[in-house]
Amino acid sequence: MSVHVLSEMAVLMRREAVQGAMARWQSHRWLLADVVPQEENFGREPRRLRHTDDESLWLYPGWPLELFSDDAEGYWLNATSPTPCYFVMWRMVDQEDGTELVAVPQALSLSYHDAGRWLDAQETVETVPLPTEAVAWLLDFATQHFVPEEKKRQRPQSFMRLTDRFGQPASVSTDSKRKGSGAKP
């Protein structure tokens, strides 16, 4: 397995007011706002960029965007999907001062397999579209490292041996020797 670090990214999370009938149960919700290339002035520490009563925007810099050669199929599935995207897994975490819960990214990936594993583990996973130029290099990486398995011909079911539920050979009879059929010997 080889690791290719493409670049560093920054994840933006947004807290917004909930509108309509759903606001009875939940006043605010967290969403993945964007994934952008890391810039020098972002720094290394997460910070709140904007805060009002209706909205809050947080920046989480320094997320490495890595590709692993043994997960090329997951990248290929993403790159060839109708809407290629970044996958971000995040969790709600208490702030250090205990004043509020904040959505904090836990992982960033371009692999369908990673996203599937996270979802199977009941994690929160959101997506944002992958830029067109990123789709091109992701597809290039995937085609270099992904070798599809050869499909094996499946034997037709009509040629399979008939067995009972215990694995013992069984047979089917077409005789009309059923009880209650009304026929007398």
Image: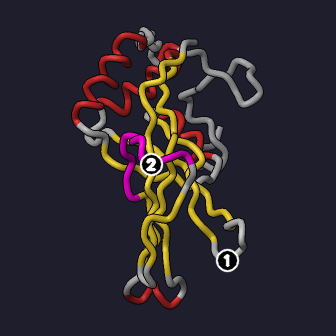
Q: Give the left or right position of residue 88, taking residue 184 as reference.
A: left
Residue 164 numbered tag = none
Query: Mark 1 or mark 2, which has the lower sequence index?
Result: 2
Residue 41 image offset from top left, x and y in percent: 42, 47
Q: Up-down: is 118 above or below 162? A: below
Nearest the eye: 101 or 160: 101
Instruction: Count residues near mark 1 (Cα–Cα under 10 Å), then give few for <14, some for 14-19, many for 20+.
Output: few
Q: Is residue 4 magenta?
A: no
Q: Give the left or right position of residue 91, taking residue 63 as reference.
A: right
- Label 2 sits on what residue type? Phe
Q: Element at badge 2?
A: helix
Residue 154 image offset from top left, x and y in percent: 46, 14
Q: Residue at x 50, y 65 (%)?
A: 48
Residue 42 numbered tag = 2
Image quarter where the N terminus lies is top right
The range drawn in magenta is: 33-44
Nearest the eye: 40 or 166: 40
As measured in the structure, the alpha-carbon distance from the residue carrying label 1 to the one carrying label 2 is 24 Å
Q: Which residue is mark 1?
A: 99
Q: Give the left or right position of residue 181, taking residue 7 as reference.
A: right
Q: Residue at x 38, y 84 (%)?
A: 19
Q: Residue at x 63, y 71 (%)?
A: 101
